[in-house]
Image: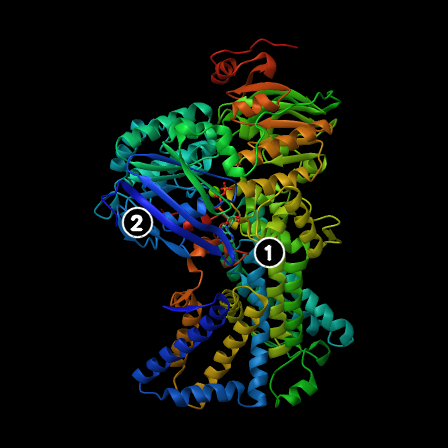
Amino acid sequence: MEKETKNIIEMRHIVKDFNGFKANNNINLTLQKGEILALLGENGAGKSTLMRILSGLLEPTAGEIYVRGKKVDIKDPTVAKNLGIGMVHQHFMLMESFTVLENIILGHESTKGPILDLKKAAKQVSALAKRYGLTLDLNARVADITVAQQQKVEILKVLYRGADILIFDEPTAVLTPQEVTEFIKILKGLAKEGKSIILITHKLEEIKEAADRVIVIRAGKSVGTFDVAAVSDDRLAELMVGRHVNMTLTKPQVKAGKEILNVKDLHVKDNRGIMAVKGLSFAIHAGEILGLAGIDGNGQDELVEAITGLRHVTSGSVIINNKDMTNQKVRKITEAGVAHIPADRQKYGLILQFPLADNLALQTYYRPPLSKHAIINHKAIHEHAEKLIKQFDIRTTSATLLASDLSGGNQQKAIIARELDLKSDLIIAFQPTRGLDVGAIEYIHKQLLAQRSAGKAILLISYELDEIMQLSDRIVVLHDGQASGEVKPEETSNKELGLLMTGAKTEGTNHD
Amino acid sequence: MIKVSPKIKRILVPIISIIAGFLVGAIIMLIWNYNPIQAYSSMFASALGNMNGIGETIREASPLIFTAIGFAIASKAGFFNIGLPGQAQAGWLTSIWIVLAYPNMPKIILLPLAIIVGTIAGALVAGVAGYLRAQFGTNEVITTIMLNYIVLYTCQYLMQQVMSPNLRIDTDTTKNISSNGSLKINWLTNMFGGSRINAGIFLALVAIIIYWFLMKKTTMGFEIKSVGANPFASRYAGMSSKKNIILSMLLSGSFAGLGGVVQGLGTYQNYFTQTTSLDIGWDGLSVALLGGSTTIGILLAAILFSILKIGGLGMQTIAGIPYEIVSIVIAAIIFFVAISYVIGLLFKTKDKKNNYQQPQRKERGPNNGIDGSNIEVGKKGQI
Ligand SMILES: Nc1ncnc2c1ncn2[C@@H]1O[C@H](COP(=O)(O)OP(=O)(O)OP(=O)(O)O)[C@@H](O)[C@H]1O
Ligand SMILES: [Mg+2]
């Protein structure tokens, strides 16, 4: 080895071959002690694969890894753990029926003899949670908490294991802007304490804010490593996608048409039986994008589930295309003209054990041309899949690849492709660009605007204020299950939205 | 560790497992001072050595194929149907009863009628568990176990109290059925040296094809697999979980019921009081698990099972090995086949760690917890 190294991790010429497809193709990466290194790349570029190799979940086909100057063979996660490497995954690995606390200590239980010492664990975990500002109800069941809270559980889990090399695979994708700021503060604090961090994110501003250096990979190859201070956003986007990305959108004028969705005085309960949507009313017209802003956990999930028939409506009504669809069956609502891009893509959006083609057929498998007289036409399903893969640029080796083997962003693209292909009058897009790279976001945004131009009504729920501001014609702010205000994007500011979202200001200036 | 390609591994693992099972069985026999070579040769001689033995082996395999399919369908939907014995028993008694009641009806009507009635009986028994599960979320493991008892004693009651004495020899045994309702085929019996082989095997082969078609080609099968693999996404996609729960249990029970029908109209030609739940139910469960719920797997596992059973009789009668030892040997063989997963660990496929998501993709069907919850998260959930 060369002179004393400050590289805590060095990955050299890493290759990962999946049956002939090279997800990583000769990647070099160095992580220095105490730094935050951002890992940037398109959906499917091989970021998660590279990090899974580092955390012992995958074995590289070729290449070498050095940790603290010593060559290591990270053949399983235990080796990684003993080397002090901990990873927060892109998709959660939590036991749904366990409590938050149980999940955090799982595999690391403190015991009194053979008895679980939950009290002691609770103390340690809440101290940890407090120290890093991760507020959580330790006794809640993971199944009952929101996606964002689950992410926090994952983070606490790694911290609890005392790792000093931390890998975060798109940790911010589900956090609200406020939480992201918090999170980055935490990251910086950790780095200052001497922990070394690899951060995967598609958000350039986060890289700017948090990272010291950034490594860009494209199609499995390293493009280069850069000092964050010395490279511009545009340049990064270009390096990553390989072409110029237009990050500003032009929104064409569209005249709003007839009313497509009307939600009136809606009351919906959450899993615990507590009212989560408390008398919400709004309408969306053809050719209109209604943005629903709000902090995660203010009734968004319950609202969407109620509209789509997945959750019982306690009172109030949901009118779609002038038909009362309150408490109707899911399929009936879908057929009445509703497409739904769900927030939790792995739980609701996909059947991970099924091939991509079957997943793309999930909404239409039961009717021609995909099946006839209850007999499935596999050829048609395959062709349908090929068409969508091409049209939406889903990066996959084949239509028969299992959904679980798609990269996170491409799983999302698959869902969007399937739902937009329904050509429904109402599109409910819940965090549609979560986990997508800038190129893909640009594409999805253009798609949504094209749908709007085509006279579709779109309900956009996003924790991303920029996304809401860019796309929406009107914005309803949700706070504690109620509309705390309705504003127009050109007449409001992030600040006003922020106030409405926290409920600090109710019923903003109504511009109608 | 030996490096092989995944394809070769798939063939090698079961073969090695079976060999290992036989070796352990041999060791057990050696411990008790029996000659394993003599024992195994008598096993194969009696199960496969002559036409009669082959016929018996095929005959034994037929009902197992049905009950295994029954188990497999339910498990694809995420359920653990251990009520196969009861469902099969219901099929057995009802089909025999129909034939006894109308002995002179033309065969072309009577035989199908008896088969259908037995199928429906099995379906209804399983349907009860399905309905309770769908409507009240009652755990199907408990209800199907209890239904086994209910069927066991209801059959006894029906036999002894309800069935006309004209149809019985005594309170525990019915008369033999007329040839109009029998699955026996003379030329087949003659061809296989007078064994009890019957048309059940043809029905079983048809059932395998139906099972394959149902799961691979129909929207119904697609929905059943979806609900089993991810109930949340299935609901999201507009599939009715209630409908699919009940449907899959009805189908499951139908096949199990058919297993009983074949046992009655084919093997025994009558019904006699059972004191414990039917073996074909439990064995069908093992066959399905052993065969990984695939069509070929079920077929091969059923044949293996029946070779062991029929051959086991030969081990007793020809080699003079006591029943208990034979049972231990058979159990050892099945045990090794069942834990073939462990044998698989001996091999390093070229791509082993790709499969870090193994739990989800080993099989596309029942990766779910018995209660239908998703356990995949837990399996890969470690850092
Ligand atoms: N087990 C597998 N078999 C085949 N291909 C795979 C497998 N796992 C991953 N891939 C492929 O490898 C490529 C890289 O995937 P990876 O998950 O590393 O992407 P990523 O950079 O993390 O993308 P994203 O930003 O969308 O999460 C993808 O094209 C994916 O489909
Ligand atoms: Mg990824």
The amino acid type, in three-letter code, at marker 2 is Tyr
Q: Is residue A218 above or below residue B68?
A: above
Regarding residue B142, the answer to whether it shows in the image is no
Separation (CA) of disc 1 from disc 2: 54 Å
Q: Residue at x 47, y 47 (%)?
A: A221
Name which quarter of the figure residue B176 lies in. Answer: bottom right
Percent position of residue A487, x then y: 59, 14
Q: Secondary structure at mark 1?
A: helix
The residue closer to the viewer here, B310 or B207, is B207
Q: Which mark is residue A66?
A: 2
Q: Position of residue A117 (x, y in %)?
A: 25, 40
Give coordinates of residue A361: x percent, y percent.
Answer: 65, 47
Q: Amino acid at mark 1?
A: Met
For the C terminus of chain A, the quadrant is: top right
What chain does badge 1 belong to? B
- The front one of A111 and A56 is A56
Q: Position of residue A267 (x, y in %)?
A: 58, 24
Residue linked to disc 1: B249
Residue B376 seen in render: yes
Give the class, few, some or many, for how many residues have Cα within 10 Å of label 1's Cα (few <14, many ≥20).
many
